[in-house]
Image (cartoon, helix red, strand yellow):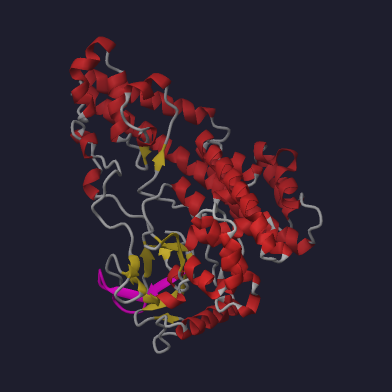
Amino acid sequence: MVGNGKMNPSSEAEEEGVKSLLKWAAKYGIEVSESCSSLGLGHCLGVSCFPGAGGRGVAALRPISKGELLLKVPKSALITTDFLLSRDETLSLALKAHPSLSSTKVFTVCLLYEINKGKASPWHPYFLHLPRSYSILAAFGELETQALQVDYAIWAAQKAVTKAKYEWEQAFTLMKELKLKPPLLTFRAWIWATGTISSRTLHIPWDEAGCLCPVGDFFNYAAPTEDPDSFENVENWQNEHAKDDLDIHHSQRLTDGGYEEDVAAYCFYAKKNYNVGEQVLLSYGTYTNLELLEYYGFLLEDNPNEKVFIPLDLDMHSLSCWPKESLYIHQNGRPSFALMCALRLWATPPRQRKSIGHLAYSGCPISKGNEIYVMKWIGKKCDALLKEMPTSVEEDKSLVHLIDKMVEYENLREWVKEASAVFGGEFGDNNILKAAYGVEGDNELTSLVRTKMLIDRWKLAVQWRLMYKTVVARCISYCTDIINSLSTQ
């Protein structure tokens, strides 16, 4: 469970900031309880710190039952494009001259325009409370992008950056017309606003760009979990993949809140029972770690919705009627239903494919020999993939540990010197130092802030590739277990 960019309240000043925000929230009709806690929300929640589990989050102040209403945020407190436009004729008239901008781009411009007002904006206390930066893929530089190591992840980061730059360029003329302050016209400011909207907006029925929900975004994220029956064992190999969830349909509600017209408020509900002091979490939806990184800027170490993709030959894709995104490996190392269907058919002699294709598409093993062949192929493919990686699982674990130790050093150069002695590639030619101090005109404080942001993103990239390799290694073990089980029958 990880937060979406929320800072850890480690000082009295930050706690005072939360109190100030909650006092402001009370004026907007957001339920704040002063009797339970100085940092209380409603009658059952409190703002608390959960080190290693999302940082600042929401704690249960009393036992909470599944389905219980947790928090209501009135419509008047929500930040939406419509509301911002209705309050400012200058903004509304300027936007009419740019009808081609998407709803998300319009909301991004509106957010920067409102922040440009400073203390004159009624949401100024909320804006002060927002993170100063986000680690979404669109914020990745070349160093962090290449640190992902896996082609499709690198491509996703490059695509996110290119898209963000294109959208910024499209909106730049409008922002100049609105006379935004120079710092708010920069690409860096656009990335910040994009990160705010990407990671913090909630769905509303009248605008696909969503809304910002002050106080409602205190909740940290918990991934929707799989049905426990979907995890099969080796003995049940004949029907294991038939139970696989393809994520095409899901009967269970994946989110814990929504806008309710009858009460004109955004309402949040408990999806499970909580004990006193336990962190109350929300499910934003089903995301892989790469998607969480792209949209929210964090990862889950144990994500039940993770999907790992391995390179497949073209003829394997041509034989499959499944889309490419369904050909993956689960977080527990098990190949997906669609991947097994495609490989079972591919491993069948061409002259037999038509007659037994129905078995493959129904998720049934074609034969013991076919199943062993497929498992051996997957195992060898995964093993070769790990050997081709620039770093191993153990090296990545050591690197993450080394990054965490960085705070023990007086300056970055000393840390890089020691790290270079252990890890050559990513530290070659002082790549970290160049990326951190490569911007001219930065003062020492700005360089320190920029360095911390870069290191945070770099660490996420290393963690992502470590999780990728861990799943691939699990797949090797899974295939070995299946082969051993079938060989003894």
Residue 38 visible? The answer is no
Percent x, y of residue 296: 49, 55
Q: How many marks?
A: 0
Report the side of 40 relative to 109 (left or right). left
Q: Quadrant of the N terminus?
A: bottom left
Q: Which residue is drawn at 51% across and 73% down?
A: 86
Report the front residue among 346 and 74: 74
Q: Residue at x 39, y 73 (%)?
A: 59
Extreme right residue here?
A: 441
Q: In this view, does 413 lie above or below 65?
A: above
Magenta-colored stretch includes residue 252: no
Report the side of 445 relative to 299 (left or right). right
Q: Is residue 357 above or below residue 362?
A: above
Percent x, y of residue 294: 51, 49
Report the front residue among 442 and 178: 178
The magenta region covers 57-71
Report the side of 292 relative to 479 (left or right). right
Extreme top residue here?
A: 351
Percent x, y of residue 139: 60, 51
Q: Residue at x 58, y 56 (%)?
A: 98
Q: Quadrant of the C terminus?
A: top left
Report the front residue among 192 and 168: 168
Residue 246 visible? The answer is yes
Q: In this view, does 445 lie above or below 71?
A: above
Would you identify the image quadrant in which residue 362 lies?
top left
Q: Which residue is drawn at 27% across and 42% down?
A: 245
